[in-house]
Image (cartoon, rainbow, N blue to C red):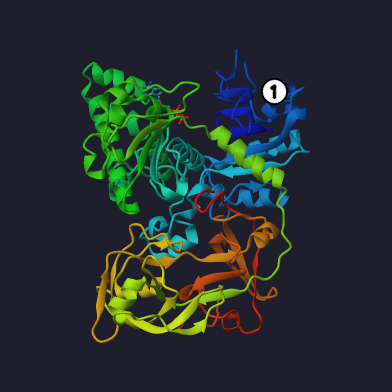
Amino acid sequence: MSVLVINCGSTSLKVAIVDANSGARLEELRVERLGTPQAAVHFADHSTSPAPATLDEVFTQLLPDWLDGLAADITCVGHRVVHGGPTFTSPTRINDQVFEQLQETVHLAPLHNPAGLAGIAGARQLLPNVPHVAVFDTAFHATIPPRASTYALPHELAKQHGLRRYGFHGTSHQFVAHRTAAFLQDDIRNLRIITCHLGGGCSVCAVEYGRSVETSMGMTPLEGLVMATRCGDVDPAALLHLMRSEDLTADALESLLNGESGLLGLTGGTSDFRDVERRAEEGDERCRLAIQVFCHRIRKYIGAYAAVMGGVDAIVFTAGIGQHSATVRHHVCQRLEFLGARLEEVANRELSLSASQSIAEFSARHSRVKLLAARTDEAWEIARLAEQVGASDTPTPTPRPIPVAISARHVHLTQATVEALFGDGHQLTPLKTLSQPGQFAAEEVVTLVGPKRSLPGVRVLGPTRNANQVEISRTDEFFLGIDAPIRASGDTANTPGITLLGTAGREVTLTGGVLCAWRHIHMTPEDATAFGVTDKDVVEVEVGDEGVRSLVFGDVLVRVSPHYQLEMHIDTDEGNAAELQRQDIGKLDVEEARRPGGTAIQLTKTPRHDGPNAS
Ligand code: ADP
């Protein structure tokens, strides 16, 4: 599968023909300093100048010649698009309508998206008969929860102007996280990984069980780390002060923050990290300070992201600086023992990635947290994602209703906890069978005692299990005063505890097990084939109302087992949002949960992600 990958910037253009399976480059070229007298075209083995003067000339003269004889093998074109805005949260096949929608993202990334769109327009004319797929830097971060993506600005204003955090470098963070899982021979769904992309632009990402849950860049690629010429985090009031005292316009401030700050600003003229390191070694104080500021900021984010995920299993460094600078890795990873990460100095110093080795470890043998450096390959990731979407030709499974059930707050208990709460030898008494085979709502109820308040009458579901689990909604969390993560049932690692009251003053304090259930669909393998999904995919589900009104639930986890029957489970908050009726007992019968008027629930999209956790 040969994919033409196009990465079109405002003054540069990178084009490669990539084998989507192996990542091998069949051909590649780079145009630099486009639109200037110094413009040059670099091929794999030589460079030429002068180069085309405009992007238009690139697509009408340079590329047609270059592709002569190669075009027949190209099955798909993958375009890097920096900002997908709120609409594009997964790689998307481009048609005229999508192209129009893409133009609406330009105001969110005026420095980046116009060039990407010009590249798409040129390439669609050049290769009109193959699928074109847009792959977004922001898409991997679509799973970041609102608590991390929301700026504390006035709600209406933020909504009106789309002021929220999106995150960037998504293809790189995603690629490197998957590489890490493969290197550790573990499933990415078991790992909490912090990926540090340190190149010209820099960002850190918290990848929890394969999903991005936090990243350092925000609404634009300016927030977060110190970069080559971008400042990263600065007190906004300092900028207001600067605007007033220097009489700066918004445009002038924008170019100051994006183009004259970061390493360049700190060192007084050097943005290339190799030069900063060399000058620091020669005794330049400003360069020394620049390296310290650069590394300190990364350390700070790593500590924060370990806290966000409740721990970390691997910290990975990538891109030019991350792969090559032992100094940066050394400064960042010193004294991280409290997290379980122990640096091996010699391994770090001698680390060198080769063509055959794209990832290497530099942590000590007994370090619980793995410290790694990895080579990123965004073009390969774009090729892989584009090929998947392009080849699938958006299979649309025959939409058919999926019954919905509201899962009210409930607990699953071990036999030992049942006895501790209800008396020795006590067995749960079935009250009502539930729709999933073998499951029942028991007569027994418990009181949940949180730090703030208590919730009585919470149903116990049977049969007993080998671990305790308390499933509550977000509203319950606020009421009880507990901050529980959204998790798939059974995934209780690092979840908070709670006290349960049973009968006759009996109580049990659990040290973990409280979670906010991740909305999910149970289905059989046959259903999964019909919908074109597999176990642990994440999909979007539309709650339709015959065109009257519809609501889309994003991020719905698919769970496949021959023992399941087709049904989507949402919690009471979500049921309210969908205007479904709620009751207070376990998992409700489908009939009881249906919206008056015969709601049909349909899975309308094929997987947004490879796994629950990737995109
Ligand atoms: P981009 O984000 O532009 O694709 P790269 O990922 O190529 O950038 O990273 C560029 C940065 O990596 C530059 O600051 C460069 O100095 C730095 N870099 C490259 N090689 C080394 C090295 N051996 N030691 C330190 N820094 C390096």
| Residue 249 place in picture, x, y as percent | 40, 44
Classify residue 411 by image quadrant.
bottom left
Q: In this view, does 73 lie above or below 518?
A: above
Give the residue at the far front of this rendering: 425
- Quadrant containing ligand 1: top left
Q: Which residue is drawn at 40% across and 81% down?
A: 428
Answer yes or no: disc 1 within 8 Å of ligand 1: no
Work out whether residue 242 can be spotted.
no
Work out whether residue 442 can be spotted.
yes
| Residue 612 place in picture, x, y as percent | 51, 54
- Which residue in the structure is indicated by mark 1? 62
| Residue 219 place in picture, x, y as percent | 44, 50
Q: In this view, does 395 lie above or below 541?
A: above
Front-most of residues 170 and 37: 170
Residue 317 is left or right of residue 345, and the answer is right
Q: In this view, does 553 lie above or below 116?
A: below
Mark 1 secondary-structure assignment: helix
Front-most of residues 252 and 317: 317
Q: Which residue is drawn at 66% across and 32% down?
A: 4
Residue 29 is left or right of residue 555, and the answer is right
| Tally of marks | 1
Q: Quadrant of the N terminus?
A: top right
Front-most of residues 391 and 99: 391
Q: Is residue 95 above or below residue 494?
A: above
Query: Label 1 is placed on what type of residue?
Result: Leu
